[in-house]
Amino acid sequence: MIILNGERSDVPGGTTVAGVLAGLGLRPDERGVAVAVDGEVIPRARWESFALDGDAHVEVLTAMQGG
Amino acid sequence: MEPRLGAALGEREQAAAAADDALVIAGRELRSRLLLGTGGFPSLELLAQAIRESGSELVTVALRRLGAGGARQSGSLVEVLAEAGATLLPNTAGCHTARDAVLTAQMAREAFDTDWVKLEVIGDEDTLMPDAPELLRAAEELLADGFVVLPYTTDDPVLARRLQDLGCAAVMPLGSPIGSGMGIRNPYNISLIREAVSVPVVLDAGIGTASDAALAMELGCDAVMAASAIARAQDPALMAAAMRDAVSAGRLAHRAGRIPRRTYATPSTTHTGLAEFGGGAGTGPYGAG
């Protein structure tokens, strides 16, 4: 079970980071978005190739007003 | 007749004079000494207006989970900030450990393509005061990772110097707790910090209104960061303009050098040539003046 932003998701293992973002309705070149998998930041350049384990914890963060 | 200084300076000369007094952080020259926080604005339109009125070149943004509190706000927020010509300064607001702050900063670097970070490591939910040991740890890690670190810190001159000595590009002491609007509760500590470090001092947190910002600059701070004071004002754009002018006035006053405080009056008009009318001496209740 992949955990996406703290919630159980139906994203299957093997999905790439780019695939997860597309599923969230984001463009591949979306500005102001960053991804971490299991506590490690995944650089933009690896979004297309990085495939998720079946039990990955994925955080997709974006810009919010603050500070 | 000599023209008055203000009248003699045209717009171009004023701009040149302002440029001479530019704020430099980590080699980056900033004309505005007011940093703007983007949190708390009721709408993106009001935020954009406030940025324009404030003249700020550096504005903070936070990172949160996509979809949390306003779904696809991100794209439009980043676009609004870009249209306003502002440079993003990501923060680590809400982080309570060095690890979370470092990860958040690294994600911000990916998201916004900047290695600048306003480092916040919060130690207490009620006061939102920084957690000093975690702050130092996070600063050290981020500096080793190539970040330009601007730490939010207490008004403690020793901690400020520690942060500078690690390599932080500036220090951002609080005037009073975040969002409290209590102004600068210990101006003496802010002055001590100004003396303790050579990197820019940016008064962060606690600003309530324009006079607080002016005081910060008069105390020798290099810049002021305001968020709630502008965002939650009844008219944010008007308050942004007030803060801009207050920061500018405070800076000029600091450079001009204020007069010392004295207990007794010092006449501003000479006694030389004072008329002596005679006749009435001793008739008043207080005798002759």
Image: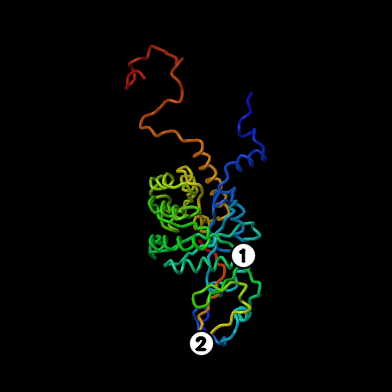
- Which residue is the site of mark 2? A1
Tell me the CA gap for discs 1 and 2: 32 Å
- In the rendered image, residue B277, in percent from the top left (x then y), is placed at 42, 13
Above or below, B159 against A60 in this view is above
Under tag 1, what secondary structure? helix
The amino acid type, in three-letter code, at marker 2 is: Met
- In the rendered image, residue A30, in percent from the top left (x then y), is placed at 64, 71
Query: Left or right: where does residue B259 sit relative to residue B62?
Result: left
Name the residue nearer the viewer: A55 or B213: A55
- Residue B40 visible? The answer is no
The amino acid type, in three-letter code, at marker 1 is: Val
Circle 2 Cα neighbour tier, 10 Å, few/some/many (<14 / 14–19 / ≥20) = some
Q: Chain of mark 1?
A: B
- Residue B145 visible? The answer is yes
Residue found at x 38% / y 45% = B188
Name the residue nearer the viewer: A4 or B103: B103
- In the rendered image, residue B122, in percent from the top left (x then y), is placed at 42, 63
Above or below, B48 against B17 in this view is below
Q: Chain of mark 2?
A: A
Above or below, B36 against B66 in this view is above
| Same chain? Circles 1 and 2 | no
- Which residue is the site of mark 1? B78
